[in-house]
């Protein structure tokens, strides 16, 4: 199967410019905090992926079907309803950490947070760094 293009691709938009355009004051403040915090936690530069995701690092995936592509290793999106933190490849067995995190919801690789003050940032750091370690051990990864 030919390499299909992922719909969500890196762009040249500045993550800081994107955040500056957020109208919701609380979401904007949390996004500014997460941007700096994730830069420190990951040691990676931020990059916009599509119109609304700020990603850190990237990895190559290949499914059993033959479909392959690249995507961010971790990141976030300040959405209208909640802040979404992307923890790839998902949550495997993180039930203990998630129980300590605070108020949140999860999807397969999405962690939904209403506001950062609802969660324990040290626990979130452990979740993010665990996800990055897993990605680096199991996939071809890049720091850009």
Image (cartoon, rainbow, N blue to C red):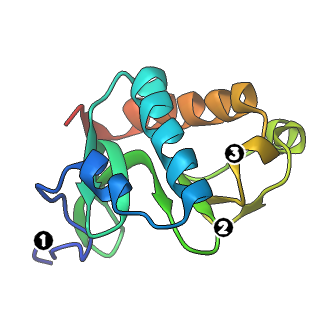
Does label 1 or label 2 sit earlier along the sequence? 1
Residue at image position (71%, 25%) is 122
Residue 68's mark? Answer: none
From the image, state whether disc 1 or disc 2 is nearer to you: 2
Tell me the CA gap for discs 3 and 2.
18 Å
Residue that numbered label 3 is attached to = 116
Q: Are marks 1 and 3 in contact (CB under 8 Å)?
A: no
Residue that numbered label 2 is attached to = 107
Circle 1 crowding by C-alpha within 10 Å: few under 14, some 14–19, many from 20: few
Residue at image position (34%, 62%) is 21
3 over 130 or under it: above or below: below
- Point out the image quarter for the C terminus: top left
Circle 2 crowding by C-alpha within 10 Å: few under 14, some 14–19, many from 20: few
Does label 3 or label 2 sit earlier along the sequence? 2
From the image, state whether disc 3 or disc 2 is nearer to you: 3
Residue at image position (71%, 53%) is 115
């Amino acid at each position: 199967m030919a390499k299909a293009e992922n719909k969500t691709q890196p762009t040249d938009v500045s993550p800081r410019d994107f955040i500056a355009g957020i109208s919701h004051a609380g979401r904007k403040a949390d996004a500014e905090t997460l941007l700096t915090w994730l830069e420190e936690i990951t040691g990676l530069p931020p990059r916009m992926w599509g119109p609304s995701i700020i990603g850190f690092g990237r990895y190559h995936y290949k499914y059993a079907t033959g479909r392959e592509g690249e995507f961010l290793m971790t990141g976030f999106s300040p959405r209208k309803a909640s802040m979404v933190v992307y923890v790839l490849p998902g949550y495997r067995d993180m039930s203990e950490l998630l129980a300590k995190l605070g108020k949140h919801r999860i999807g397969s690789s999405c962690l939904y947070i209403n506001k950062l003050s609802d969660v324990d940032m040290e626990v979130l750091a452990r979740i993010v760094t665990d996800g990055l370690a897993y990605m680096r051990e199991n996939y071809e990864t890049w720091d850009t």
